[in-house]
Image (cartoon, rainbow, N blue to C red):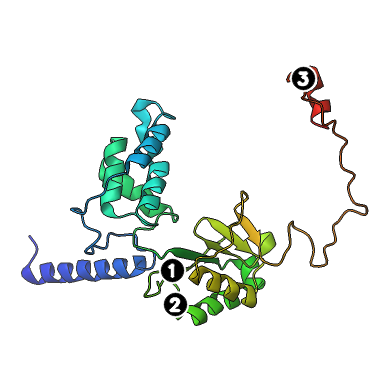
Amino acid sequence: MLSTRTSRVASAVAKKFQQQSVRSMGTAKSFHLESPNNKAETYFDFSEENYVRVNQVLQKYPDNYRQAAMIPLLDLAQRQAGGWLPLAAMDKVAQICHVAPVRVYEVASFYTMFNRTPVGKYFMQVCGTTPCMICGSEEIMQTIQNHLGIKNGETTKDGYFTLLEVECLGACANAPMVQINDDYYECLSKDSMIELLELMKQDKLPEVGKWGSLPMNGQVSCEGPLGKRSLLKPPVPPKVDPERFKAGEVDPASVKTHMAY
């Protein structure tokens, strides 16, 4: 049996370890932070329109594997909640997927695309990995902070902007870049970043189109700074018969011809 002194020491060590663990996890926010709008009692349910989407997602999986729908349903809940996942939303997904709530918490705390604290209308994730850093991501980060008066991980008082530096977003060829909500804005400079910020203030952010990416220097491909390619001559476009599908039928043996291979 432990002595009183030994028990006090063990308790102090455990408390110290807990404090250090919380501090080390603080930047990742990998634990639940209760707030007035984020409690277990807070109400959340999918809208009628989103329940249609929920059922469409569930139909992709056998009924005994409903948990496979967890990630798309969390994404849907996050969009409905305004860009973040309150505890009640995660509990609702657990209920629909027929799993214990902790299973949903594990997924939501593992994947960085899920935000468990509120974010601004424009959630800006600046890539700070080596290719972007070499091409000027630190200047982009500093430009945003100076222009909006916030630091990494903070949200402006009006709730419009949240800034976060992240690791590789996979757009290395068009560095530096920033992901704003779902879309990529690439080939940034200090001036083009300020231009984007001012457009966001007016809710006039340019749409990036179906590709989800918009180079801000007019570049439309992975070309060099002078527009030159590695090919010695421009490629000759394939000759395609515009009437090739007019009859509505295609002979499988001639697919390559029809596809201009």
The picture places residue 207, in percent across and down from the top left corner, at 58, 57
User: In the rendered image of this protein, does residue 232 appear above or below residue 69?
Assistant: below
Mark in front: 2 vs 1: 1
Per the model, the C-alpha gap separating discs 1 and 3 is 54 Å
Pointer 2 residue: 151
Residue name at image x 87 percent, y 42 percent: 237
Mark in front: 1 vs 3: 3
Residue 247: image tag? 3
- Name, please, the residue furthest toward the right: 233
Pointer 1 residue: 162
Per the model, the C-alpha gap separating discs 2 and 3 is 61 Å
The picture places residue 103, in percent across and down from the top left corner, at 31, 44
Question: Which kind of residue does numbered mark 3 sit on?
Answer: Ala
Q: Let me know if residue 187 appears in the view.
A: yes
Question: Which kind of residue does numbered mark 2 sit on?
Answer: Lys
Question: Which kind of residue does numbered mark 1 sit on?
Answer: Thr
Is the N terminus in the top left, top right, bottom left or bottom right quadrant?
Answer: bottom left
